[in-house]
Amino acid sequence: MGGDLHMSPSERDSLAAEVEACDREAEVGRQNRDHHQVLSQLERGLHLRRKLYHEGSQEVSAACRRLCEACNFAATVLLQQDDLKGAHELLKRAEQVSDRSDLDRAITWNNMACYYRRTNKLRSAVTFLERALAIEEHTGNADAAQTHLNLCATLSQLGRHGEALQHAQSALIRIYEILAPQLFNGELTLEDISDDSREQFTVLCIAYHNLAVEQEHLKKIESACCAYAEGYRWAGKFLGQSHQLVAILKHSAESVKAKLPASSAAVTRASELMDGWPQAAARSVPQAERSQQLEGLLTPRHAGGNGGIPDDLPSKQSAGRGSEEYSARFSSQEGSYSDEGSRNSGI
């Protein structure tokens, strides 16, 4: 019980019936792709629920989230139609009702960044992307990787290529963290890749592309050559030879290879990568020797450390147990892929 405490039971019943009617009309609008009808009915439904229930109720919160989702979806449609003013108004409304959910805020701020990129207000776009990333960074989905790529592309447009490179690298790490368990568990096969997994592989290949673009900007030509080739290898295997990214990555790799001497190790490595995955060869290095070699790679957490195992970790006495576990849209302006389209579940 909440809302207007002085309302009679009959008045409450009447309002409840109106709420149900709004929900039905919103669903009709959704099926007919009538965004105006959807938004108007969701707005009215939220208004009526605020009369029936208190502001912190589950009913009001759910209505806010539905309206936020609908505003974001309609805004992205208007962005595609170049109705920038209409899109901005809807995104401002989405931001007003997004305070019930971190996810809603992150989606709204990502889409707000898309608006600011379209209007060439790149610094504002960076601000909204950084806000979204602060929410997404510790979630277990691929949203953070896409936001890193958006930041990469936006910073690249601003000429901040060192920062853009860092975001491309972060995107690679995040998407590998999503894909690696699926690959290890045998959940991904070439014959049966879900739409979600295909999107994740697309993000991975875009990350390699953007990484290579920024390496080119920073005159790291050998690294760019190998990054393009690595992206091509993944795209060819998991997206299919007809995918647009395959052609783009192949052309980019070949173009960069042509700038390097034929004797370059990077050219040799890029050619190997573009040939696909070789058969794994057996290795005979003893486990104890491998463990000793790897221990020297650990960076000490405290100043003045000498490398190797940090002081606050137990030394590895039982090496025989095995090693430890330590826990699209193409932008022609900069030659970078970015996630300018929104991430939303649609209406």
Image (cartoon, rainbow, N blue to C red):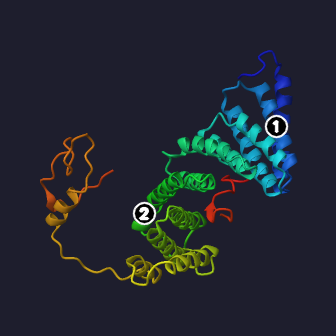
Mark carried by residue 68: none
* Quadrant of the frame with the N terminus: top right
Q: Give the answer, above or below, for where 122 lies relative to 93.
A: below
Residue beneath label 1, please?
Answer: 43
Q: At 55% across and 41% down in the image, what residue appears?
A: 135
Residue at x 78% of width, y 43% of height: 88
Q: Position of residue 325 (x, y in %)?
A: 29, 55
**Residue 33 visible in image:** yes
When the figure is inspected, residue 301 is found, relative to residue 152, above or below; the finding is: above
Circle 2: is it few (<14), some (14-19), or many (20+) Cα within 10 Å?
few
Q: Secondary structure at mark 1?
A: helix
Give the residue type at disc 2.
Ala
Horizontal and vertical percent position of residue 347? 75, 52
Which residue is tagged 2?
A: 180
Q: Of all residues shown, which one is farthest toward the top? A: 6
In this orientation, does residue 191 appear? no
- In the figure, is residue 281 to the left or right of 195? left
Q: Which residue appears at 44% of the width and 68% of the height?
A: 223
Foreground pick, 291 / 155? 155
Q: Tell me the amino acid under the disc marked 1.
A: Glu
Q: Pinpoint residue 253: horizontal percent, then vertical percent.
A: 53, 76
Q: CA distance from mark 2 to mark 1?
A: 42 Å
Neighbours of disc 1 within 10 Å: few (<14), some (14-19), many (20+): some
